[in-house]
Image: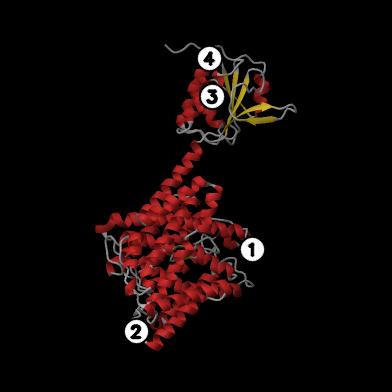
Amino acid sequence: MKPTDPKETGSSRLPFLRGLLPFNRAQFPHDVVAGVTLAALGIPEVMGYTKIAGTPAVTGLYTILLPLIAFALLGGSRHLVAAADSATAAILAGTLVTVAAFGSPEYVGLTSTVALTVAAMLVLARIFRLGFLADFLSRSALIGFLTGVGLQVAIGELAGLIGLPKEGHGPVGQIASVVQRLADTHYATLVLSVAVLAVIIGFERLAPRIPGALIAVVGAIAASAAFNFTQHGIAVIGNVPSGLPSLSVPALHLAHIDQVLATSASCFIVILAQSVATARAYANRYNERVDANLDIVGLAGANAAAAVTGTFVVNGSPTKTEMVDSAGGRSQVAHLTTAAIVLLVLLFLTRPLSFMPSAVLSAIVFLIGVKLVDLKGMKELYRLQKDEFFLALITAAVVVFVDVKHGIIVAVFLSFIDHARHSYRLRTRVLTRDAAGRWQAHPVAPQLFAAPGIVVYRFEADIFYANAGRFMEEVLKLVENANPPVRWLVVDASEVSNIDYTAGKMLLQLGEELSRRGIGIASVAVPDGVRAELERYRKFAGEAGRQEIFATVDAAVDALRDAAPPPPRPAAA
């Protein structure tokens, strides 16, 4: 399907409604159907996320009411669904539980405060155009983080599947607790859990377009109401408040400000990385423009809406976005349709929800956790990039064996380490001409001349403080071991886009060192690379920084072939 070019309409000039305009009449019925599908699949899912986040079940419905509308009006993506998400729900549960009890008014208030703080952080990110920060949580670290979250979430529901209260600290303690109490299993609850899992998995495998989760939920509610499950020892979620959420600004909670800020920062990082990556993937699929900073505005609005309606952080959800896309949705009209259906549920259908067995939500959450465990991604990493596989594995292990907050810290830290390692690692070559006059690149070694007495050394990475010393060391070894002696060293910096202060001073020092040895130095740099920076350092150093700068390697070699190097300079006293 060829998307309508937003340039064709004045709506493209608006800083909002990008996900809704231009309106496509032919697409409208498909978007409505996709919205109904998202409601059918998403309502049970977001109620399941409340078990992860530790908030009342109705707060899950609130995440797909005003937050969906806010993102539809303010965001830039036509596809991204901003709603409750397992990763951010797990961060809340793993951090805020240390200062308030699950489900308590204080705890729920803290989750709303975190949502408001995240909204403020996203606003600041938009003001300073920090959308690029999403690129600094590497895909491999994100795979490991979500895999760890999935394991933690799935393990946390094992007790609920067999009708036991959750006990034990962390996944290992929870598994041990379940094993020790197997004799106390409530078999009616276990049978119900297995039936729900069978229905959901069966429909996913055999008829994926049919909402198996919704069928399981409706069936379980009907059975619970008809057979009074509570009399048989099967727990139900109980009263679900009806009507619209009340609007209020959450309290600041100064006593827990450190915990709120740390939790918000963790959620902020995950939201940036996951939401921007998801929006970009679907924009590329349909040849649409990506505006990460506008999506940040939409996410800020969605989280502010979540905060004032008493619910928790929302995130760009890859699973819900795929639900809408698979159902034919191509604009935020689908998400507004979902919000309208949720409104009807809150007004008229909350009483039936009170009969929902708790084991149904445990089963739904268990499957959510299992799906987050990205075995395919881990296998691909192991096969294609083993070093990044271990980065993902370490991140997952920290999430499982420590906690989610430290897992996201480790994910970000390892992403930066991985980036620095790739930048630090030298990618260098020496160039020579073959018989046909074409340039050939060789691993760095002496006795490789581009012309008599001329060595061309190519550096294929930005030069900065961490690799500047290695650069200088390799160049000096190259000229020291050359026989016959080198007259000119040509540094091919055409692949370099940045030189920091440390590297600039190192180049001046290298020029002085080579000059003392009677070796001239020249550079190859292009106008959109680092030519201006090299010129600036050369002028700053004056005579000590004299160095020829050429546009191409050919120009440098041709000009220097018969040129005498500068006379050796005496060492400074």
Query: Where 418 falls versus 455 (above or below)?
Result: below
Q: Label 3: which residue?
A: 475
Q: Which of marks 4 and 2 is nearer the N terminus?
A: 2
Q: Which residue occupies 54% across, 68% down? A: 323
| Residue 329 visible in the picture | no
Residue 57 appearing in the image: yes
Q: Mark 1 points at which residue?
A: 4
Residue designated by label 4: 517
Q: Name the residue under label 2.
A: 232
Q: Give the class, few, some or many, for how many residues have Cα within 10 Å of label 3's Cα (few <14, many ≥20).
A: some
In this rendering, the label closer to the viewer, 2 or 3: 2
Cα–Cα span, label 4 and label 2 = 92 Å
Q: Nearer the viewer, mark 4 or mark 3?
A: 3
The type of residue carrying mark 1 is Thr
Q: What element carries label 3?
A: helix
Earlier in the chain: of badge 1 and badge 2, it is: 1
Three-letter amino acid code at the position of disc 4: Arg
**Disc 4 or disc 1, which is closer to the eye?**
4
Label 1–label 3 contact, CB within 8 A: no
Q: In this view, does 524 lie above or below 45?
A: above
> SS at mark 4?
loop
The spot of residue 4 in percent (x, y) is 64, 63
Calculate the distance from the C-alpha at mark 4 to the C-alpha at mark 1.
65 Å
